[in-house]
Amino acid sequence: MFRFLKTTVLGGVLFLVPIVIFIAVIGKAIQLTDKVAAPIARLMPVESVAGLAVVELIALLILVVVCFLAGLAARTDRARKLVETLEANVLDKVPAYALMKAKTGSMLSPDDTRDMQPVLIQFDDSWQIGYEVEKIDDTNSLIYLPGAPDPWSGSVCAVTNDRIHPLQINIKEVSLLMKRLGKGSTEALRNPIGAGSA
């Protein structure tokens, strides 16, 4: 019971840290742009639009423009080298930043997961849910074994094809099962396990 509480709390912390940092950064950015937006807003004939203060709308617009310009700058080699230097000398020494970077860097896009098949892998004395990433050859496949409660923190291994049993669920459902520590997976796993032990 204690281990379950510990892993769930730690999983919640890992999930919340990047979100809290993102909200804090956006909030601070809006505060800074408010100072620039306030003089501009005083020149406008109205004080609010659709219930939102003009100063807030202008601040948001400034923030979007700054992000767009930063995105353009990020495409240049000089900016990329500057960011790499900043990360190596300052940001990577901040635990929260290193954690957020690792989390976002490990996420796969929908295009990356499109061809990954959810499967059940049979080991010597256990079964494990995973994704078949690709076929290595006619007899072996590369498998990703997701962790729980964070499905994007796991391990990769190669197994023989006779140990792999396709599941009739999609990647989103597998991720949800991992976040729930397997709760609700009975129906998805019953047939493959039954077939494998027969």
Image (cartoon, grey):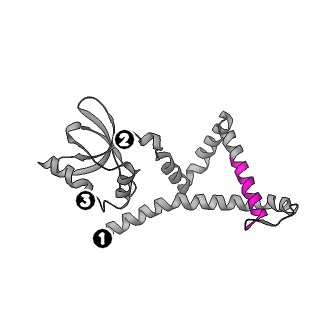
Cα distance, mark 2 to mark 3?
22 Å
Please state the extent of the stretch shown in magenta in the rendering. 49-67
Report the side of 53 relative to 172 (left or right): right
Identify residue for label 3.
186
Sequence-wise, which precedes: disc 1 or disc 2?
1
Cα distance, mark 3 to mark 1?
21 Å
Sequence-wise, which precedes: disc 2 or disc 3?
2
Where is residue 50? Give x, y as percent. 73, 65
The reply to whether the C-beta atoms of the residues labelled 1 and 2 are less than 8 Å apart is no
* Figure quadrant of the N terminus: bottom left
Question: At 44% from the left edge and 40% from the top edge, which residue is drawn?
Answer: 112
Q: Residues within 10 Å of mark 3 (few under 14, many from 20)?
A: few
Where is residue 187? Give x, y as percent. 25, 57
Tell me which amino acid carries mark 1: Met
Question: At 87% from the left edge and 63% from the top edge, which residue is drawn?
Answer: 45
Question: At 42% from the left edge and 61% from the top edge, which residue is drawn?
Answer: 11
* Image height of 5 relative to 40, above or below: below
Q: Residues within 10 Å of mark 1 (few under 14, many from 20)?
A: few
Which dot marks residue 116?
2
